[in-house]
């Protein structure tokens, strides 16, 4: 089964994946390695730089017994002009069960499903469209820490406009009954975001006290050139999560960040490393979620 | 002497206000008149009973790709596609490689079209050298080479100063030859037209679809409609400043329709007051009054074009603009791309779709059948109105006119099949669509280029 995004998954399908991920937590470390996907081959096709997602998928695959193939376009036939579809078809022809694809173009994983046969496609992030495993692992982490999802108020803070993580989080969280607030400057949180059934806020201080979870999206420095905000310093001033803001938030507020984090910009070190922070839990849970996703992908 | 008879068809010629069942005689490539001509013995009779006999359709907005991108289309294949679609004259855009910005380039197009022996192909010259927007192309030499209008289509003339000078300069290229069709004094006043691809590039940089709810859902960089509106406004006021002739290509926004409507009203007021006026007209392409950006949710590059598919409100406004005459021209923006170019990641695929072979049936199905336009209104926008924009002696069946004739079966229902296209390319979102109406004979200069009639 393909996993292209959370937008087109039902509530039950999302819960099913979250539940399935529970039994994979700690596999390969606290719990013995598994062989669910013995004999399966997972190809990681990454057309865009990635550290954690790429390593996480590769490690997850190995801990459930699959073999992995890694592809990135630099130094490959892509540099010789081979198209994305041709490259993927050639890799799949080697005998691949699941293609994990990361691409800077929104819709690239869907394009692959139309050109590849007998293989499941897992989206590891496409443009600003979706990053479903990141969305799942964020939701998994807050469910693990807070014990529920429905009724929680979750603020996604930062660059909603360009964020695939934000879109996947919004689709998943709203389906599971959370209240989502998209918070950032109007340049990065346009009014069209309201179509997802979320509240729009441009003043972090005004919503702080209401939030059970703050998910701090990474600030992409190149957006400063695009006039989305005047400076990184001003961004941190208005939307950065710091110790002072943490004191005004709920005592048990949960801090998430999909990373890579810019310390001192969207999050200060004291917040990143405090007991409210679940940032490293997210990384660990990411493995479990991806094991569950890969297992589902191998099922027809 | 060779005589061709179109027998017993419903002759619709909006330029003459004709809509009646009658005969049309053509002798030696020229129309000799409607009604019975007892003195003439036809060499060939086309039985047009139950059919519409119209002036040959003009598509003033096509990309034929030759020279430079013959893998997408050639003048021959594009002209063949035109004939299949009932189009007898196309005007081709200068965004070839190299750009059509010199007299010899214009003459090359005309030569290739003559070799192809299909439809008439009229070159449109670039406004600026290499379509770079920096210096005016040699517009006078282009006119001598056969260019009928100017545009940097595919890209805007970003500099308002260069646009202003182009509009002033082209005013001197007045009609020299006598026309068979009646020419309104106003039509004749402004020289050659500058055709506007309206896009403020700073607002569309990196954009691949309409900016709106759908682009935000898909996480795709959008292009706001105002990027089009702003330049339409700029060029309307520059037309007034200069007394020039401006035609807005492929209008896709409600705002654009509104601005052109206001501009036409202003030009008409000036004209009535006996003051110096200007020309402003606008064109609509089928995809902009049929499809919206909601079609993009599958990231299918056959729905990717520039200007992009917009919202239902824009579609409704364009239909309204067609109905009230604000948009006087229908055209295709026929933009062929070889399959391997469209089969790419959505943001990397090129813009545009082919249109020549779906032009007439889409307009019949979505404008006439839906009651937005009458047959004469639709045909006017596909014949004499584009002829007026280009200043060419085409688009009517008046006595003495070059016998370009399209015979239309108005009722036939059929299904679009891209595999049957004569165009070299297949980038078309309408495969499998049911449509009504089809060209059943295409006659160019009295020569029957296509006919399925008895």
Image: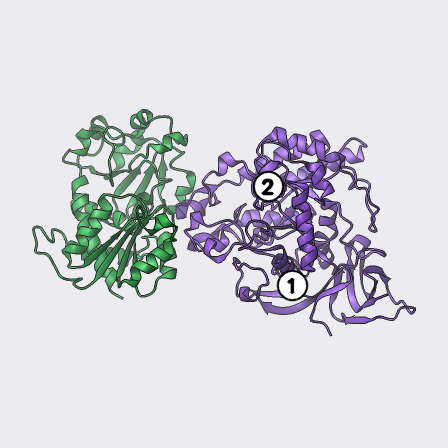
The answer to whether residue B324 is above or below residue A208 is below
Residue B279 located left or right of residue B157: right
Instruction: Identify the chain drawn in green.
Output: A
Please identify the quadrant where the C terminus of chain B is shown: bottom right
Q: Give whichever of discs 1 and 2 has the lower sequence position.
A: 1
Q: Is residue B302 above or below residue B437?
A: above
Q: Can residue B360 be seen at all in this image of the molecule?
A: no
Observer-nearest of B65 and A35: B65
Residue B431 in view in this figure? yes
Asked if marks 1 and 2 fall on the same chain, the answer is yes
Residue A61 on image: x %, y %? 19, 55
Give x and y (percent) for residue A215.
26, 39
Residue at point 58%, 60% (across, down): B423
| Residue at mark 2: chain | B
- Mark 1 belongs to which subunit? B
Q: Residues within 10 Å of mark 1 (few under 14, many from 20)?
A: many
From the image, which quarter does the N terminus of chain B lie in?
Answer: bottom right
Give the CA separation, mark 1 to mark 2.
27 Å
Q: Which residue matches tag 2?
A: B197
Colour applied to chain B = purple
Residue at the farthest right position = B39
User: Which disc, if any, is residue B84?
Assistant: 1
Q: What is the secondary structure assignment of the residue under circle 2?
A: loop
- Tell me if mark 2 has few (under 14), some (14-19) or many (20+) residues whose alpha carbon lies within 10 angstroms of its own: many
Regarding mark 1 in the picture, which secondary structure is present there? helix
Residue depth check, mark 1 versus mark 2: number of the one nearer the observer: 1
- Examine the rendered structure and indicate whether residue A172 appears above or below residue B49: above
- Is residue A109 shown left or right of residue B5? left
Across and down, in percent, residue B69 comes to 54, 51
Taking the spot 53% from the left edge, 55% from the top edge, the residue there is: B71
Instruction: Quadrant for residue B450, please give it.
Output: bottom right
B187 lies above or below A231: below
């Amino acid at each position: 089964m393909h996993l292209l995004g959370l937008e087109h998954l039902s509530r039950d399908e999302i819960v099913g994946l979250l539940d399935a991920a529970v039994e994979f937590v700690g596999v390969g470390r606290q719990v013995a390695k598994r062989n669910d996907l013995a004999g399966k081959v997972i190809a990681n096709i990454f057309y865009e730089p990635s550290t954690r997602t790429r390593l996480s998928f590769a490690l997850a695959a190995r801990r459930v017994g699959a073999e992995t193939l890694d592809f990135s376009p630099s130094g490959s036939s892509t540099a010789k002009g081979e198209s994305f579809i041709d490259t993927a078809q050639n890799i799949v022809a080697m005998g691949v069960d699941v293609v994990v694809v990361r691409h800077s173009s929104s819709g690239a994983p869907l394009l692959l499903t139309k050109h590849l046969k007998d293989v499941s496609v897992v989206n590891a992030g496409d443009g600003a469209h979706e990053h479903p495993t990141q969305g799942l692992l964020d939701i998994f982490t807050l469910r693990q820490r807070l014990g529920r999802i429905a009724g929680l108020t979750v603020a996604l803070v930062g660059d909603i406009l360009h964020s695939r993580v934000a879109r996947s989080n919004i689709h998943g969280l709203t389906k599971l009954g959370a209240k989502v607030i998209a918070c950032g400057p109007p340049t990065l949180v346009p009014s069209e975001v309201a179509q997802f059934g979320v509240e729009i806020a441009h003043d972090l201080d005004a919503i702080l006290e209401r939030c059970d979870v703050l998910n701090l999206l990474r600030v992409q420095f190149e957006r400063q050139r695009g006039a989305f905000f005047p400076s990184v310093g001003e961004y941190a001033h208005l939307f950065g999560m710091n110790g002072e803001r943490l004191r005004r938030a709920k005592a048990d507020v949960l801090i998430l960040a999909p990373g890579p984090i810019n310390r001192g910009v969207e999050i200060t070190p004291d917040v990143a490393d405090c007991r409210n922070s679940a940032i490293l839990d997210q990384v660990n849970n990411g493995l479990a979620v991806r094991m569950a996703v890969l297992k589902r992908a191998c099922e027809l | 002497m060779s005589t061709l008879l179109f027998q017993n068809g419903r002759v619709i010629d909006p330029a003459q206000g004709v809509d009646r069942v009658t005969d049309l005689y053509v002798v030696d490539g020229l129309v000799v008149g409607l009604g019975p001509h007892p003195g003439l013995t036809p060499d060939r009779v086309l039985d047009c009973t139950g059919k519409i006999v119209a002036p040959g359709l003009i598509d003033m907005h096509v990309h034929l790709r030759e020279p430079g991108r013959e893998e997408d289309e050639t003048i021959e294949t594009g002209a063949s596609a035109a004939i299949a679609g009932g189009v007898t004259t196309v005007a081709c855009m200068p965004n070839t490689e190299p750009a059509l910005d010199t007299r010899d380039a214009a003459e090359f197009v005309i030569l290739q079209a003559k070799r192809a022996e299909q439809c008439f192909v009229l070159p449109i010259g670039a406004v600026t050298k290499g379509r770079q927007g920096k210096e005016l192309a040699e517009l006078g030499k282009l006119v001598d080479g056969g260019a009928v209008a100017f545009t940097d289509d595919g890209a805007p003339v970003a500099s308002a100063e260069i646009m202003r000078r182009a509009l002033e300069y082209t005013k001197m290229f007045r009609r020299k030859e006598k026309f068979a069709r009646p020419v309104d004094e106003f039509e004749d006043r402004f020289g050659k037209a500058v055709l506007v691809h309206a896009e403020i590039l700073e607002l569309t940089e990196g954009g691949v679809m309409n900016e709106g709810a759908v682009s935000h859902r898909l996480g795709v960089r959008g292009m706001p409609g105002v990027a089009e509106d702003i330049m339409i406004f700029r060029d309307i006021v520059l037309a007034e400043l200069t007394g020039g002739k401006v035609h807005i290509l492929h209008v896709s926004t409600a705002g654009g329709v509104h601005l052109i409507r206001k501009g036409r009203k202003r030009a008409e007021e000036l004209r009535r007051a006996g003051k110096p006026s200007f020309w402003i007209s606008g064109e609509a392409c089928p995809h902009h009054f049929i499809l919206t950006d909601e079609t993009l949710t599958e990231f299918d590059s056959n729905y990717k074009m520039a200007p992009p598919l917009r919202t239902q409100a824009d579609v409704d406004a364009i239909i309204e603009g067609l109905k009230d005459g604000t948009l006087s021209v229908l055209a295709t923006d026929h933009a062929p791309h070889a399959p391997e170019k469209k089969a790419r990641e959505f943001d990397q695929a090129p813009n545009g779709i082919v249109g020549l072979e779906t032009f007439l049936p889409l307009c019949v199905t979505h404008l006439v059948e839906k009651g937005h336009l009458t047959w004469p209104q639709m045909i006017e926008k596909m014949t004499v109105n584009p002829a007026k924009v280009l200043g060419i002696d085409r688009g009517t069946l008046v006595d003495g006119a070059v016998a370009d004739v399209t015979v239309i079966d108005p009722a036939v229902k059929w299904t679009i099949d891209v595999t049957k296209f004569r165009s070299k390319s297949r980038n078309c979102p309408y495969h499998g669509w049911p449509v009504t109406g089809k060209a059943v004979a295409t006659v160019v200069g009295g020569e029957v280029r296509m006919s399925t009639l008895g």
